[in-house]
Amino acid sequence: MISLIGTYECKMDAKGRLMMPAAFKKQLAPVLQEGFVVKRSVFQRCLEVYPKQEWDLVMAKLNKLNRFVKKNNDFIRRFTAGVKVVEVDANGRMLVAKDLCQFAGLTKELVLSSAVNIIEIWDKDAYEQVIDDAVVDFADLAEEVMGNIDLDELS
C-alpha cells in the first residue's frame, strides 16, 4: 500500500496539464509507469488521483458487490462516473480532462494534497475554504474519529 505525504501548490496550463510535484513523483517512483486513475470525489468538489495499483484494490472491492441489486449498480455507476486513466508524461505533466476540471471547478491555481494513498486535486481557493471551514470542527472531528481507537492497533 502506498502512503503519500505532502500538500503542494501548482499551476494548470490552458490545455489542462499540471506538473506533478517533484516530491510526489519521488514517492510514486515505483508505480509511476503503471499510470493513474482520476475520478470525481464522492464527498467534496475535488478530484482524486489513484495510483493504478490502489485503484485495482478499490475495483476488487466493488467487484464483490452483487450487480443484480439496484442500489449496488447505482453506486458503481456514480462512483465510476467520469473516471479517466492518465499518465505522467516524460516532462512530469498530467493531463486532466475538461469534464473533470469543470466538476472540481479547477482554474489555473491548484493544490495537490495527499490523502493517505491517493492525491486530491483542488482549486486553490476551494481548498483553502474547505480547510478554513474545518478548523473550528477539527478538534471535535479528531476526537470522534480517532479518540476511541487504540493507537497500538493501528501499527
Image (tube, rainbow, N blue to C red):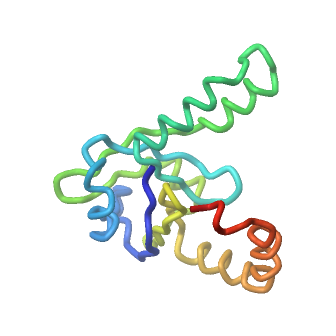
User: Which residue lies at the image location 72% right of the left edge and 66% below the top edge?
Assistant: 150
Q: Report the residue that reaches farthest toward the top.
A: 68
Instruction: Where is residue 97? Give x, y as percent.
Output: 44, 47
Relative to residue 23, is residue 38 drawn left or right?
Answer: right
As rendered, which of 66 and 103 lies closer to the eye?
66
Instruction: Where is residue 2? Give x, y as percent.
Output: 43, 54
* Residue 62 in which image quadrant: top right
Question: Looking at the picture, does residue 123 appear above or below residue 153?
Answer: below
User: Which residue lies at the image location 73% right of the left edge and 33% below the top edge?
Assistant: 75
Tally the numbered discs: 0
Q: Which quarter shows the C terminus?
A: bottom right
As rendered, which of 34 and 140 lies closer to the eye?
140
User: Which residue lies at the image location 41% right of the left edge and 51% below the top edge?
Assistant: 96
User: Which residue lies at the image location 62% right of the left edge and 61% below the top edge?
Assistant: 154
Relative to residue 106, is residue 4 drawn left or right?
Answer: left
Instruction: Where is residue 1? Give x, y as percent.
Output: 45, 49
Instruction: Where is residue 19? Give x, y as percent.
Output: 30, 64
* Residue 35 in which image quadrant: top left
Question: Looking at the picture, does residue 39 appear above or below residue 126?
Answer: above
Relative to residue 111, is residue 131 drawn left or right?
Answer: right
As rendered, which of 62 and 12 lies closer to the eye?
62
Q: Report the residue that reaches farthest toward the front.
A: 152
